[in-house]
Image: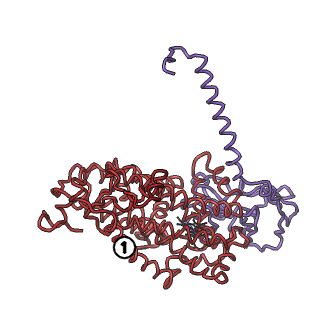
Amino acid sequence: MSGESTYTPGNGFSRWLDDRLPVMRLVNDSFVDYPTPRNLNYWWTFGGILTFCLAVQIVTGIVLAMHYIPTTELAFASVEHIMRDVNYGWLLRYVHANGASMFFIAVYIHMFRGLYYGSYKAPREVLWILGVLIYLLMMATAFFGYVLPWGQMSFWGATVITNLFGAIPFVGEALRTWLWGGFAVGDPTLNRFFSLHYLFPFLIAGVVILHVWALHVSGQGNPAGIEVKDPKKDTVPFTPYATIKDAFGLVIFAILFAYFVFYNPNGLGEPDNYIEANPLSTPAHIVPEWYLLPFYAILRAVPDKLGGVVLMFGAIAILFVLPWLDTSKVRSARFRPLYKQFFWIFAAACIGLGYCGGQQPDKILIHVGDGGFDVTDLSRILTVYYFAHFLILFPVLGLIEKPKPLPESIAASVLPGTRQEKATS
Amino acid sequence: MAETHADEPTRRDFLYVATGSLAAVGAAAAIWPLIDQMNPDASVLALASAEFDIGAIPVGQEITVKWRGKPIFIRHRSEEEIAEAESVDVSSLPDPQPDDARVIAGPGGELEKQWLVVVGICTHLGCVPLSYRGEYDGYFCPCHGSVYDTSGRIRKGPAPLNLEVPPYEFVSDTRIKIG
Ligand code: HEM
Ligand code: FES
């Protein structure tokens, strides 16, 4: 939809600049006059919200880095120093720590939006793949960041995750030592994680630019999952329509964010991380941050070390090939009666995996005699379901499902009178 | 270069390939220091071996010492613990090793079966197992539930290998040197 540019420089200076560096033209064409489908709902505001999250993390992070000390001797104390001594340090740290969680809430909604409305389908495969790449980089960044305060969870989380690489045949041991810079997680590890934690958000920013570029080549999708036919009828200019809608969504999101920062700042964290790292004693129950729990559950579901690692990374890798696993010609779940139901089962399975990841693996859920059905059993079932959703349901549903009739056009799907059928959600 | 599609490789082709290869080798040589700087540095490698006094550990108890940043369990095993470790059918173990191969000879040349020295790091993903827990009276790893016996051998759970026995020797009857 990147049609002809409609930018007309308003004064002498902007004309002069436009001939030399048409940056205002780029901004205008991308965020002002840019045509957006007129039927976008609030699930489409999360792109803007995610950009906000990235900016918040970078700004608060750079300021925290002015006070933080990346050595095993002083890291824990320096975070306490930020909390107690630095002016507004508590605010900056709570915004940064909860900001990571908010970032993941937003990215998960954004991704499930994509799954529901088939946003990954042609011609948006590259757009989707870039998104999965951002998600991977986010997980790496958050992992590095979580190590920095050097609490018990920081240390043992880092130990468990770096040990995953030790499962790789032949090179595993050497790779692990290389990651550590020693024979266990220690000073060299903390230092390099800090360096990488600083770097990765800027890599994310770079991929975000490619992501938005790809978006503007293919045009935004929309809840009806049909392409724009007549830009005059089917689209509205980005500003003011999308800008205001995004801004409203952002305000609601910011209220939730503020609730966590001011009223429940440690609600999403682990109390054990306020105990300084002790390499000689593992806490009785170690868990990663909530946003990694489903993958942790998959890891523990497999009784074999290498197998667990392979499935865990496979669970993310499979997202890259999703555009080619889905055989349906219809994008939006609105018009896919079967897929719509399986979408919600899948969402429930992911939440179930998250639950399992947070529990002790041998916790009994249903008692039968001496033993029973425990968390590991549930994780196994859900892990199988997770993969079956991608490898079996996506290819098969597209072939056997009879989609509902699609609306004639985007305009017809939302304008009163012309509406063919009232679409739910 | 429109008309150079000769069937035979020419001298020019050879020069192209040779130049390209040299450039690739040069690039790899330049990247290597950037990669290798992350490996353990001289000060980490220099961590010397360390001696520990074990004379004060009563039978049936264990101490944890730190060596190369890792916990080392030194366990003074009781007769029952030794008997338990020796009574297992070795071939039924996930990582078969007789108990005799996990202890070393003391200054007198006899196996010091009462002393078990192992690296206290679970061979699954590196947590520190809890001592005297789990159904084999050895160790239980809280992270993902691996269970080790009184010889530090893996019996149950996701860990693939027995707890590692570090390189050590008896300096005297009551002192060992690890490393
Ligand atoms: C994608 C963006 C980012 C994410 C998801 C992220 C995530 C995190 C997380 C989860 C923590 C641990 C918070 C805690 O429990 O205390 C953390 C800490 C930290 N981050 Fe970031 N971060 C991001 C960007 C940045 C940037 C750009 C910097 C700039 C240098 C930075 C600097 C720091 C510092 C110094 C700490 C340690 C202080 C503390 O623990 O609060 N972060 N980060
Ligand atoms: S680290 Fe010990 S069982 Fe996983």
Q: Is residue B84 left or right of residue A247?
A: right
Q: Can I make out residue A89 in this image?
A: yes
Give ligand 1's quarter of the image.
bottom right
Residue sitting at 50 percent across and 80 percent down?
A261
Q: Position of residue A93 (x, y in %)?
A: 58, 76
Residue sitting at 60 percent across and 25 percent down?
B16
Q: How is the image coloured?
A: by chain
Of residues B81 and B133, the one drawn nearer to the viewer in this rendering: B133
Residue A405 figure quarter: bottom left
Q: Position of residue A151 (x, y in %)?
A: 63, 73
Measured along the vertical axis of the image, is residue A91 above or below residue A280? below
Q: Is residue A65 left or right of residue A28?
A: right
Of residues A165 and A80, the one drawn nearer to the viewer in this rendering: A80
Q: Is residue A410 left or right of residue A124?
A: left
- Identify the image quadrant of the C terminus of chain B: bottom right
Dot 1 alpha-carbon crowd within 10 angstroms: few under 14, some 14 to 19, many 20 or more: some
Dot 1: what SS?
Answer: helix
Q: Tell which subunit mark 1 falls on.
A: A
Q: Residue furthest bottom?
A: A263
Q: Position of residue A307 (x, y in %)?
A: 49, 53
Measured along the vertical axis of the image, is residue A390 above or below residue B1? below
What shade does chain B have? purple
Residue sitting at 48 percent across and 65 percent down?
A292
What shade does chain A have? red
Of residues A49 and A172, the one drawn nearer to the viewer in this rendering: A49
Give the total of numbered labels.
1
Label 1: which residue? A249
Of residues A278 and B37, the one drawn nearer to the viewer in this rendering: B37
Q: Position of residue A333 (x, y in %)?
A: 25, 60
Question: The disc labelled 1 sits on which kind of residue?
Answer: Gly
Q: Can I make out residue B140 in this image?
A: no
